[in-house]
Amino acid sequence: MPTKPSTPTKRDELIDVASSLFYEQGFGATGVKQIIDTAGIAKGTFYSHFESKEELGVAWLKKRHQVWNGWLSTEVDKSTTPRRKVLALFDFLEKWMVESRFRGCAFLNTLAEVPDPENPMRHEISSHKSELRAAIQQLASEHFSDKSSAYAKQKGSIIFLLFEGALVEAQNFRDTWPIVEARKEVTQMISAEA
Protein backbone atom coordinates (compact mmCIF):
# COMPACT_ATOMS: atom_id res chain seq x y z
CA MET A 1 0.00 0.00 0.00
CA PRO A 2 1.48 3.38 -0.99
CA THR A 3 2.30 5.68 1.85
CA LYS A 4 1.13 9.25 1.86
CA PRO A 5 4.00 11.76 1.58
CA SER A 6 4.54 13.46 4.91
CA THR A 7 3.68 17.13 5.23
CA PRO A 8 6.68 19.27 6.15
CA THR A 9 6.69 20.25 9.80
CA LYS A 10 7.67 23.65 11.21
CA ARG A 11 10.97 22.03 12.14
CA ASP A 12 11.50 20.98 8.50
CA GLU A 13 10.60 24.48 7.33
CA LEU A 14 13.09 26.02 9.74
CA ILE A 15 15.83 23.72 8.47
CA ASP A 16 14.98 24.66 4.87
CA VAL A 17 15.07 28.40 5.63
CA ALA A 18 18.31 28.04 7.57
CA SER A 19 19.79 25.91 4.79
CA SER A 20 19.40 28.71 2.25
CA LEU A 21 20.68 31.38 4.61
CA PHE A 22 23.61 29.39 5.99
CA TYR A 23 24.73 28.35 2.52
CA GLU A 24 24.43 31.79 0.93
CA GLN A 25 25.65 33.95 3.83
CA GLY A 26 27.60 31.56 6.03
CA PHE A 27 26.74 30.05 9.39
CA GLY A 28 28.34 32.82 11.46
CA ALA A 29 26.79 35.68 9.49
CA THR A 30 23.27 34.31 9.86
CA GLY A 31 21.47 35.19 13.09
CA VAL A 32 18.58 33.44 14.78
CA LYS A 33 16.45 36.60 14.39
CA GLN A 34 16.96 36.56 10.62
CA ILE A 35 15.99 32.88 10.47
CA ILE A 36 12.86 33.55 12.56
CA ASP A 37 11.91 36.59 10.44
CA THR A 38 12.52 34.78 7.14
CA ALA A 39 10.53 31.75 8.31
CA GLY A 40 7.73 34.02 9.51
CA ILE A 41 7.45 32.33 12.89
CA ALA A 42 7.47 33.37 16.53
CA LYS A 43 10.67 33.20 18.57
CA GLY A 44 9.04 30.60 20.82
CA THR A 45 8.35 28.36 17.81
CA PHE A 46 12.05 28.40 16.93
CA TYR A 47 13.09 27.47 20.46
CA SER A 48 10.44 24.77 20.73
CA HIS A 49 12.31 22.95 17.94
CA PHE A 50 15.94 23.95 18.52
CA GLU A 51 17.73 24.89 21.72
CA SER A 52 20.31 26.92 19.82
CA LYS A 53 21.53 28.02 16.42
CA GLU A 54 24.23 25.35 16.73
CA GLU A 55 21.60 22.61 17.15
CA LEU A 56 19.87 23.92 14.03
CA GLY A 57 23.28 23.93 12.32
CA VAL A 58 23.72 20.23 13.08
CA ALA A 59 20.25 19.46 11.70
CA TRP A 60 21.06 21.50 8.58
CA LEU A 61 24.33 19.64 7.97
CA LYS A 62 22.60 16.27 8.41
CA LYS A 63 19.98 17.21 5.82
CA ARG A 64 22.58 18.73 3.51
CA HIS A 65 24.53 15.46 3.70
CA GLN A 66 21.51 13.48 2.49
CA VAL A 67 20.60 15.95 -0.25
CA TRP A 68 24.14 16.44 -1.58
CA ASN A 69 24.92 12.72 -1.54
CA GLY A 70 21.67 12.15 -3.43
CA TRP A 71 22.76 14.61 -6.12
CA LEU A 72 26.17 12.93 -6.41
CA SER A 73 24.76 9.38 -6.48
CA THR A 74 22.23 10.28 -9.16
CA GLU A 75 24.97 11.61 -11.42
CA VAL A 76 27.44 8.77 -10.78
CA ASP A 77 24.76 6.09 -11.22
CA LYS A 78 24.03 7.34 -14.75
CA SER A 79 27.37 5.85 -15.78
CA THR A 80 27.59 2.19 -16.70
CA THR A 81 31.28 1.37 -16.28
CA PRO A 82 33.53 1.69 -13.21
CA ARG A 83 35.86 4.00 -15.18
CA ARG A 84 33.02 6.34 -16.18
CA LYS A 85 31.69 6.35 -12.60
CA VAL A 86 35.04 7.63 -11.33
CA LEU A 87 35.13 10.36 -13.97
CA ALA A 88 31.47 11.21 -13.31
CA LEU A 89 32.58 12.52 -9.91
CA PHE A 90 34.33 15.37 -11.67
CA ASP A 91 31.54 15.89 -14.20
CA PHE A 92 29.19 16.30 -11.25
CA LEU A 93 31.61 18.62 -9.45
CA GLU A 94 31.95 20.91 -12.45
CA LYS A 95 28.20 21.06 -13.04
CA TRP A 96 27.41 21.64 -9.35
CA MET A 97 30.03 24.37 -8.89
CA VAL A 98 28.74 26.31 -11.88
CA GLU A 99 25.11 25.91 -10.73
CA SER A 100 26.00 27.06 -7.19
CA ARG A 101 27.86 30.09 -8.61
CA PHE A 102 31.05 28.70 -7.06
CA ARG A 103 29.71 29.02 -3.52
CA GLY A 104 31.43 25.72 -2.78
CA CYS A 105 30.98 23.07 -0.17
CA ALA A 106 28.67 23.86 2.74
CA PHE A 107 30.71 21.53 4.92
CA LEU A 108 34.07 23.12 4.15
CA ASN A 109 32.61 26.62 4.40
CA THR A 110 31.26 25.77 7.84
CA LEU A 111 34.50 24.08 8.86
CA ALA A 112 36.27 27.43 8.38
CA GLU A 113 33.74 29.08 10.70
CA VAL A 114 33.74 26.50 13.50
CA PRO A 115 37.28 26.18 14.91
CA ASP A 116 36.43 24.05 17.97
CA PRO A 117 37.13 20.40 17.04
CA GLU A 118 34.69 19.27 19.76
CA ASN A 119 31.78 21.21 18.29
CA PRO A 120 28.97 18.84 17.18
CA MET A 121 28.91 20.55 13.79
CA ARG A 122 32.54 19.50 13.26
CA HIS A 123 31.46 15.90 13.86
CA GLU A 124 28.89 16.21 11.05
CA ILE A 125 31.48 17.72 8.72
CA SER A 126 34.00 14.97 9.44
CA SER A 127 31.35 12.30 9.05
CA HIS A 128 30.26 13.71 5.67
CA LYS A 129 33.82 13.82 4.34
CA SER A 130 34.62 10.33 5.68
CA GLU A 131 31.57 8.91 3.92
CA LEU A 132 32.51 10.67 0.68
CA ARG A 133 36.06 9.29 0.88
CA ALA A 134 34.70 5.77 1.49
CA ALA A 135 32.33 6.10 -1.50
CA ILE A 136 35.17 7.21 -3.77
CA GLN A 137 37.35 4.38 -2.47
CA GLN A 138 34.53 1.96 -3.36
CA LEU A 139 34.40 3.36 -6.91
CA ALA A 140 38.18 2.94 -7.16
CA SER A 141 37.87 -0.65 -5.90
CA GLU A 142 35.37 -1.40 -8.66
CA HIS A 143 37.68 0.12 -11.27
CA PHE A 144 40.85 -1.53 -9.94
CA SER A 145 39.15 -4.87 -9.29
CA ASP A 146 42.20 -6.79 -10.47
CA LYS A 147 44.47 -5.06 -7.92
CA SER A 148 44.79 -5.54 -4.16
CA SER A 149 42.23 -3.86 -1.92
CA ALA A 150 45.01 -1.78 -0.31
CA TYR A 151 46.09 -0.54 -3.74
CA ALA A 152 42.54 0.38 -4.75
CA LYS A 153 41.89 2.06 -1.40
CA GLN A 154 45.03 4.18 -1.75
CA LYS A 155 44.06 5.22 -5.30
CA GLY A 156 40.58 6.07 -4.00
CA SER A 157 42.14 8.31 -1.36
CA ILE A 158 44.15 10.11 -4.05
CA ILE A 159 41.02 10.60 -6.15
CA PHE A 160 39.21 11.93 -3.06
CA LEU A 161 42.04 14.41 -2.42
CA LEU A 162 41.99 15.57 -6.05
CA PHE A 163 38.21 15.96 -5.84
CA GLU A 164 38.41 17.99 -2.63
CA GLY A 165 41.30 20.12 -3.85
CA ALA A 166 39.50 20.86 -7.10
CA LEU A 167 36.38 21.81 -5.16
CA VAL A 168 38.26 24.28 -2.93
CA GLU A 169 40.25 25.87 -5.75
CA ALA A 170 37.24 26.12 -8.07
CA GLN A 171 35.54 28.10 -5.28
CA ASN A 172 38.68 30.17 -4.72
CA PHE A 173 39.24 31.06 -8.39
CA ARG A 174 35.53 31.03 -9.28
CA ASP A 175 36.45 28.97 -12.32
CA THR A 176 36.27 25.35 -13.44
CA TRP A 177 39.93 24.98 -14.46
CA PRO A 178 40.90 23.21 -11.18
CA ILE A 179 38.22 20.58 -11.84
CA VAL A 180 39.30 20.18 -15.46
CA GLU A 181 42.91 19.66 -14.39
CA ALA A 182 41.98 17.22 -11.60
CA ARG A 183 39.82 15.24 -14.07
CA LYS A 184 42.79 15.04 -16.49
CA GLU A 185 45.02 13.68 -13.72
CA VAL A 186 42.45 11.10 -12.64
CA THR A 187 41.82 10.09 -16.27
CA GLN A 188 45.52 9.48 -16.69
CA MET A 189 45.72 7.55 -13.42
CA ILE A 190 42.85 5.21 -14.18
CA SER A 191 43.78 4.74 -17.84
CA ALA A 192 47.42 3.98 -17.20
CA GLU A 193 46.77 1.50 -14.41
CA ALA A 194 43.55 -0.18 -15.47
Image (spheres, rainbow, N blue to C red):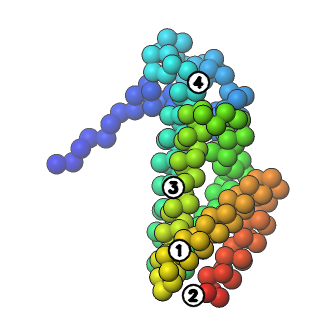
The label number, if any, that marks residue 33 in the structure image: none
Q: Which callout, 4 or 3, points at the residue further toward the start of the chain?
A: 4
Residue corresponding to mark 4: 53
Three-letter amino acid code at the position of disc 3 = Glu
| Nearer to the camera, 110 or 84 | 110
Mark 4, mark 2: which one is toward the viewer? 2
Q: Which residue is mark 2?
A: 194
Question: Closer to the N terminus: mark 1 or mark 3?
Answer: 3
Q: Residues within 10 Å of mark 3 (few under 14, many from 20)?
A: few
Q: Using the rendered view, name the quadrant where residue 113 is placed.
A: top right
Cα gap from disc 1 to disc 3, whole angstroms: 18 Å
The amino acid type, in three-letter code, at marker 4 is Lys
Looking at the image, which is closer to me, 189 or 24?
A: 189
Which is in the foreground here, disc 1 or disc 3? 1
Q: Is residue 192 left or right of residue 3?
A: right
Image disc number at residue 131? 3
Q: Secondary structure at mark 4?
A: helix
- CA gap between label 2 and label 3 equals 25 Å
